Amino acid sequence: MKHFTTLLLTLGILLTVQSFAGAELTDAMKQEGWTAIFDGKTLEGWKSNEPVEGFKVEDGVIVGFGGRNHLYYMETLKNFELKIDVNINNDGNSGLYVKAQWQEGVWPTSGYELQINSSHRDPQKTGSLYNIVKIHEAPHKDDEWFTYHVICRNNEMAVYINGKHLYTYVDQRQGEPVIPITEHNKRVAQSGHIALQQHHDGSVVKFRNIYVKKLAD
């Protein structure tokens, strides 16, 4: 795996990034090309990959509950920026997927999972790119809102939390995946879906202010 991928840990960033935790979509953001993909009231445009209910909307927030479930935003995206506010409870576990292929009734095996975990026993904490970049100390507390900002451009992905650049990951294997998904191609840089994870019963994860800006190929 190591010879297929390169991880760049950089101190410099290409643009100034601010935290938008708790922020509404402003006119300036709209002019920059940002759009809201969650209307704050319904799950229109999103689809669960399980036959049971696992996500609901309360007070402008998507709340995950119950057993395993994944909520996919059904538009396919390739080059884009994503900003999303997240909150996880004590011993909660969740994930934020980008470029994932639709898979019904299973844990997603394609795309990339950004971990959401402040105190669960899983040692990979928030900010980790699951099983690729491992962060062992969460940058937030239980029940504390924080903002993920992810920039996906071709085979590169830059990850920020609360405006701080954590890393830029570069996948050397480029191109669209071959179907069916295999161990070799499942994380190839590709187009795909954003997906929100409900990991287990007892975990309560919340999402709000979900914004996307499409980037040129």
Image (spheres, helix red, strand yellow):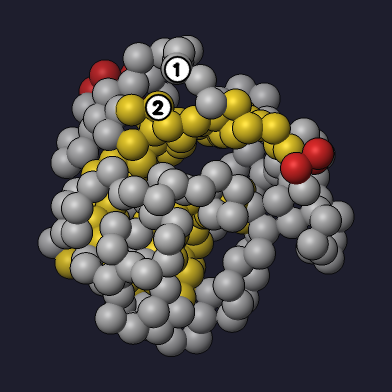
Q: Which residue is mark 1?
A: 11
Asked if residue 84 is positioned above or below residue 186 in the image, the reply reads above
Asked if residue 69 is positioned above or below residue 210 in the image, the reply reads below
Of residues 88 and 71, the one nearer the viewer is 88
Residue located 16% across and 41% down the image: 22
From the top left corner, tell me how far across and down residue 10 is, in percent: 51, 20
Residue 107 location, quadrant: bottom right
Q: Is residue 37 visible?
A: no
Q: Which residue is mark 2?
A: 165
Please identify, in this view, whether the residue under mark 1 or under mark 2 is nearer the observer: 1
Quadrant where the C terminus lies? Answer: top right
Of residues 128 and 215, the one nearer the viewer is 128
Q: Which amino acid does the dot numbered 2 rest on? A: His
Q: Secondary structure at mark 2?
A: strand
From the top left corner, tell me how far across and down residue 147 is, in percent: 29, 41
Q: Secondary structure at mark 1?
A: loop
Of label 1 and label 2, which has the lower sequence position? 1
**Marks 1 and 2, how far apart at CA:** 8 Å
Residue 108's tag is none
Residue located 70% across and 51% down the image: 187
Of residues 12 and 105, the one nearer the viewer is 12
The answer to whether 16 appears left or right of 158 in the picture is: left
Asked if residue 152 is positioned above or below residue 197 in the image, the reply reads above
Mark 2 crowd level (few <14, some 14–19, many ≥20, 10 Å Cα) = some
From the top left corner, tell me how far across and down residue 15 is, in percent: 42, 13
From the top left corner, tell me how far across and down residue 42 is, in percent: 29, 63
Q: Decide: marks 1, 2 in contact (CB < 8 A)?
A: yes
Mark 1 crowd level (few <14, some 14–19, many ≥20, 10 Å Cα) = few
